[in-house]
Image (cartoon, rainbow, N blue to C red):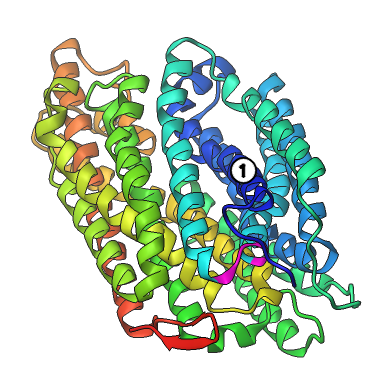
Amino acid sequence: MATVSLGSPAGKWIMVSAILASAMAFIDSTALNVVLPSLQKSLHATGADLFWLLNAYLLMLASLILIGGALGDKLGRKKIFMAGIFVFIAGSAACGLAPNITLLIVFRIIQGIGGALMIPGSLSLISSSINENERGKAIGTWSAITTVVTMGGPVLGGALADAGLWRYIFFINIPIGLAALLILWKNVKEIKDDSKDLSLDFPGAIAIALGLALLTFGFLRIPAIGFNNWEIYCSFGGGILLLVAFIFIEVKSKYPMMPLHLFKNLTFSGANLLTLFLYAGLGAGMLFLSLNLVQVQGYSQLQSGLTFLPFTVLMITIARPAGALADKHGPRLLLIVGPAIAGAGLLILSFVKQTAGPSAYFTTFFPGVIVFGLGMSFTVAPLTTAVMGSVSDHFSGTASGVNNAISRIANVFAYAIFGALAVLFFSGALSGRVETINISPNEKHAIIAQAADLGNAKVPVEISAGNKAIIEKFYHESFIAAYSNILKISAGLGFLGALMAFFFIRNTVVKKGNIIVQTH
């Protein structure tokens, strides 16, 4: 398969189209968290509605992204990439026009379908089109720019939310997507495998999609109905059985959508384990940090978004050089050090208690954000390089799909599992505090019932005026206790990711001219 130089016109157009499409998809996950309070008020949504809104998109993405990667490999990477962009634009336009929360959740599902076709295509185009000795640099550039746009999402989201324009978070995708489609149509050639076989693994696709959906549904229902419930048993049991069936189907299939032999490569397996642990910690940590800033620490939505600006600056300056270092020396050391530093940053953030608000940012949250951003900047490009470099070009779309699916699965499960844990931690801390004041059992029950809303808990109307300030203080203290525990667990997941790199990831063999060089 012919490849092009990163600096050639064709290479530049491929990079631009991949960056535009990826940024369009990734910005949703960061900007939407910031606009949730405005969205909730505008559409009269409950806390549970918001939780489903976040996960509807991620669930479809996680369930179908493997199909998207396989379709690109077999039918043409450009063709499937463009189809995904079109569906994502249509879903975004519908989300921006949604009159109620139910339809918004439905339209987020459409966005997820588009993202599942689009996201693997961006990396697959780069991996299969750019010269092998420049791929690390290309992926580093892609990582840096998409992360800048992605992490700029909270700033944009905060500004739009404070102005009452949260719907433009979705509308902004339309011109970006149309530009990407125009570039692909006019300047990028079709790239697909030489194989004439176009068979698709439909049984495997159905099994993985339904299995993940059932497991996710079970996790999302635990906070509402508890673990000891027939819905949970059926969801978990059915989900596990379907995932086992998926593995069996892949073993027996002549044309599997997720070739299990890829996992015989320790680097591929280790990189995906690292992704699972690190991105679960990232998703939970960033969600609860955002909630803490707005609901407890007194930050506006724009100020909350601006707290991530140092992260963005670090990604601009470090991600691309990190990709180049991975090319030259191999990704292993960076993938050990990076997640460990990121875990340390989350650990530092876990020790921040009640602050004086935005005026105290530089002495409270700033150090942890800097350390966390440094760790992620060392990790993102080398991790992608390790995944894509551990497989042949023939499986580039599949490898990208597997890794992206795992990162989305990590986020879905993080929101669900850590959401349930946070309610448990919050309730426990709140119960202990409520016992210290003299109120009736009914009042205690009403106070603790608000724990499901976490930082948005409101003092019940039956509480006397003299106790309202005390209860509000208890809510804040209890949320901070829950936040601290969640961030510590997230930090542990970062350290676990570093261990995966230490035990499994090996530096790859690279070809320079006619000389084979083993990197160390």
Tell me which residue sits at (53%, 22%) in the image: 39
Crowdedness near tag 1: few (<14), some (14–19) or many (≥20) residues, C-alpha within 10 Å = some
Does 358 appear in magenta?
no
Residue 423 seen: no
Q: Which residue is mark 1?
A: 16
Task: Locate residue 348 relative to residue 456 in the image: left or right.
Answer: left
Task: Locate residue 73 relative to residue 143 in the image: left or right.
Answer: right
Above/below status of 91 relative to 411: above
Query: Which one is in front, 296 or 404?
Result: 404
Q: Secondary structure at mark 1?
A: helix
Residue 233 seen: yes
User: Which range is magenta?
Assistant: 128-132
Specify the quadrant of the image occupied by residue 443: top left
Tell me which residue sits at (74%, 27%) in the image: 94
Specify the quadrant of the image occupied by residue 2: bottom right
Q: Position of residue 473 (x, y in %)?
A: 16, 26
Specify the quadrant of the image occupied by residue 5: bottom right
Tell me which residue sits at (50%, 87%) in the image: 515
